[in-house]
Amino acid sequence: MLSTGQKQNKKAVANMQPKESEPDVDFISLYLEYTSQTECPTFFHRWTAVTCLSAYLGRNIHFNHGHFVIRPNLYTMLIGKPGTKKSSAIKIGAKLMKQAGYKTFAAKKTRQEKYLLDLAEQSTKLDTARGGDGMEAHIDAILDANLFGEFNENDPESYLDKPAAESFIAADEFNNFIGIGNLDFASILGELWDYEGVFDYKLKNSDSIYIPHPTVTILGGNTPTGFATAFPVEAIGQGFFSRVILVHAEPSGVLYTFPPPPDTELQDRLVTLLKDIKEQVRGEIVMTDEASALLHNIYHGWSPIDDVRFEHYANRRLTHLLKVCLVMVASRIGTQMTVKDVVAANTLLTHTENLMPKALGEFGKSKHSAIANKVMDIVYSTDTPIRFKALWKLVHQDLDNRQQLVEIINNLQVAEKIQSIGSDGYLPIKKQRDSGVAGAIDWNLLTKEERDL
């Protein structure tokens, strides 16, 4: 239930803005219409819209959660086999962000220290973008402050009043950005996910850099094999892994020899809507009593993902949900969180979680996990049973002998991933969609294409 302070804040918001008028269409729905004539899966487009909006919001809105503050920034990884159009989805979203005036994109390929140095400079760049005099004014301010003893460039506290350092990592080839096996970089990104204050990082030369109020959003693209290449098995227990939402989709099956150009009218409406959202949706987001009660039921009634690899994700599930709720509020230019926002966010997150084990494939399970994932992809990609001989022809170059394939198939059967149809071959075992807490999910909010995943 709401605290006394939250109830007072909610009443104040209601008095300041008597009308909670909803636009004819929210940003996410309009974006899906804008991208409807592409080959990308709708589910990738939906998460691209949600993540891009979360980056565009930056620190404009927040939700007070006990001793902590929750921001809308998200770490999203689109995962699918090659040809699922992950890059296309990310590039379309990033391009729209640029057209709406967003400037703080991270480099597509970087190193850990270079990224943090760039992030530290974002404060000055944002100052310039907002009409300041940029670096010269920043240097003059430091000199003046030092003269009067008010600023110490070696004291993190002195950076608290600086503009927040925002960064949107829109990396359609995420491995190019983070590198291979770079657990240190992943660990730092994990720490920045919900960081408040000034981030202090000591460089190799013993100098320190100070990053005021880092606000990082990630929209990356990968394949199950690429993900396993980028992150060693030890990453499963790291903080970064629990902060990433893994979004799986299959190829849409739509083919455009000559794709239609983007609808410029829809494009202009989206850009205008983004600017309206940034201007009108600001400050603390409070919730209705009904939304608070529903979130309470979801938190206490949610069933963890049936996969030990997501044990640590479960501990942050409520935070993920609240972040997506904030995006849903902003998408409709709302001023407070309602049941409608909670249901929309929980439906999207629940459906995504049902697919997360498939997004991860067999990563981290055995020495033949990459081949096991390949076998799963083959079996799941057909509507008719596939026989052992056909499977062997497709994976024989990856294994030493047929017995290894027998073991992989047996393990997948025991794990209830595939099933034997006698002499006809093998078919996937598709689990029933999790319906979650009563009243907290509306599958009609997703398209048939998305539900069929």
Image: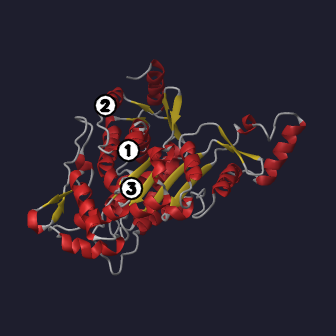
Does 182 sit left or right of 126 as displayed?
Answer: left
Residue 119 picture location, percent across and down: 65, 52
Evaluate if marks 2 and 1 touch, with contact meaning CB atoms under 8 Å apart: no
How many neighbours does mark 1 have within 10 angstroms: few (below 14), some (14-19), or many (20 or more)?
Answer: some
Going by the numbered disc 1, the residue's amino acid type is Phe
Q: Please tell me which residue is depicted at 36% across the width and 59% down the height of the picture.
A: 369
- Between 362 and 291, the one lying in front of the other is 362
Q: Residue furthest right?
A: 147
How many neighbours does mark 3 have within 10 angstroms: few (below 14), some (14-19), or many (20 or more)?
Answer: many
Evaluate if marks 3 and 1 touch, with contact meaning CB atoms under 8 Å apart: no
Q: Which residue is mark 2?
A: 294
Going by the numbered disc 3, the residue's amino acid type is Phe
In the image, residue 112 sits, relative to residue 257, either above or below, namely above
Instruction: Measure the alpha-carbon separation of dots 3 and 1.
Output: 12 Å
Asked which quadrant contains residue 11, the reply is: top left
Residue 173 picture location, percent across and down: 49, 65
Query: SS class of the residue under badge 1?
Result: helix
